[in-house]
Image (tube, rainbow, N blue to C red):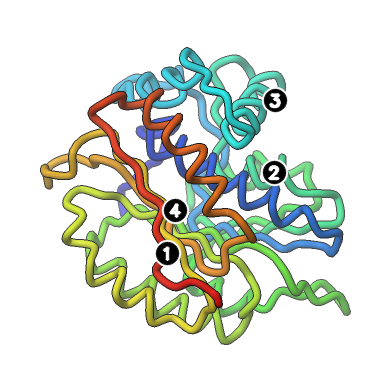
Amino acid sequence: MNYRHAFHAGNHADVFKHITTLAVCDALLAKPSPLFALDTHGGRGLYALDSNSAQRTGEAEAGIGRLIAEAPRHPAINRYLAAVKACRAQHGPTSYPGSPWLLAHALREEDRIAVCELLPEEAAQLKANFAGDPRVATHTRDGYEAMKALLPPRLGELRYNRGLVLIDPPYEAQLLEFDTIIAALRDALVRWPNACYAVWYPIKLRRSLNQFFRRAATLPVKSSLLAELMVHPDDSPLRMNGSGMLLLNPPWQFDTTMREALPLLQKALAGSDGSWRVEWLKQAD
């Protein structure tokens, strides 16, 4: 594996994914019982947008940079921008929070977070970034294997009935990655059926994802939702034109939140070139 998220931190896909992740966390926090979150492909969890890697691609300029400049008003977007501001107050003005940092920022003292990263160099930096937070356990291991080992989550006698599993792989196996994802989800739903599962996926040609959507619709959950943000028309297989999130067991009225936020996000990041959609694969009665 040679993927390094530092090249892409803060781009349009990160912005969309992180707004969605924080919105899920906030919805789950509406109930007082403790939560467990598993981030299966966490990277290093914290990035510097003035690093050589980030500067080489410049992708953050059209992502978080553009969103800060446009500053559309919606609670979910405001929540995300406030988290980025808090990260920069703590780590410097060019820092950018990865999903592990955002989970740690959003969740409470009684909640617990496990983050996996397979690449040793990235995993070492991840461990260093969260060394002072007793809520966060970092693991240098395959995230799919960790789903089998860590679910259902327990801490001593405490069993976590609610929480979030975030699956955000690099897709170096391209479409074959979806086979692994579906198998991992099917197994995890047996182990921890009440959790919310959020799967990020890139979009080049949307029609190539149809088989994944059909298989996702057969998973044993009461509800499953797709949310997507496109910054280019989905007619080129040579670039990432947008991205989406598959949400299994999404929080109540989460579709409404996304239907309100995504048009504003599209306008800020893509203007008339972009598009969005929120669509149920399966909806509870």
Element under label 2? loop
Specify which label sits upstream in the sequence, 2 or 4: 4
Nearer the observer, 245 or 192: 245
Residue drawn at the location 37% of the way across and 42% of the way down? 4
Q: Amino acid at mark 4?
A: Leu
Crowd band around label 1 with a 10 angstrom C-alpha radius: few (<14), some (14–19), many (20+): some
Residue drawn at the location 28% of the way across and 33% of the way down? 274
Residues at marks 1 and 3 touching, judged by CB atoms closer than 8 Å = no
Q: Is residue 200 left or right of residue 149?
A: left
Q: Amino acid at mark 1?
A: Trp
Task: Report the number of numbered marks.
Answer: 4
Instruction: Return the x and y of residue 213 as percentages of the image width and height.
Output: 31, 69
Q: Which residue is mark 2?
A: 130
Query: Which part of the image, by quadrant, shows the C terminus?
Result: bottom right
The Cα–Cα distance between marks 1 and 3, rounded to whole angstroms, is 33 Å
Instruction: Return the x and y of residue 100 as percentages of the image width and height.
Output: 61, 46
Residues at marks 1 and 2 touching, judged by CB atoms closer than 8 Å = no
The Cα–Cα distance between marks 2 and 4, rounded to whole angstroms, is 17 Å
Q: Is residue 92 above or below residue 59?
A: above
Marks 1, 2: nearer the viewer = 1
The Cα–Cα distance between marks 4 and 3, rounded to whole angstroms, is 27 Å
Residue drawn at the location 63% of the way across and 17% of the way down? 92
Q: Amino acid at mark 3?
A: Ala
Q: Which residue is mark 1?
A: 280
Q: Which residue is mark 4?
A: 119
Element under label 3? helix
Q: Which residue is mark 3?
A: 86
Crowd band around label 3 with a 10 angstrom C-alpha radius: few (<14), some (14–19), many (20+): some
Element under label 4? loop
Crowd band around label 4 with a 10 angstrom C-alpha radius: few (<14), some (14–19), many (20+): some
Q: Amino acid at mark 2?
A: Phe
Instruction: Return the x and y of residue 233 as percentages of the image width and height.
Output: 18, 38
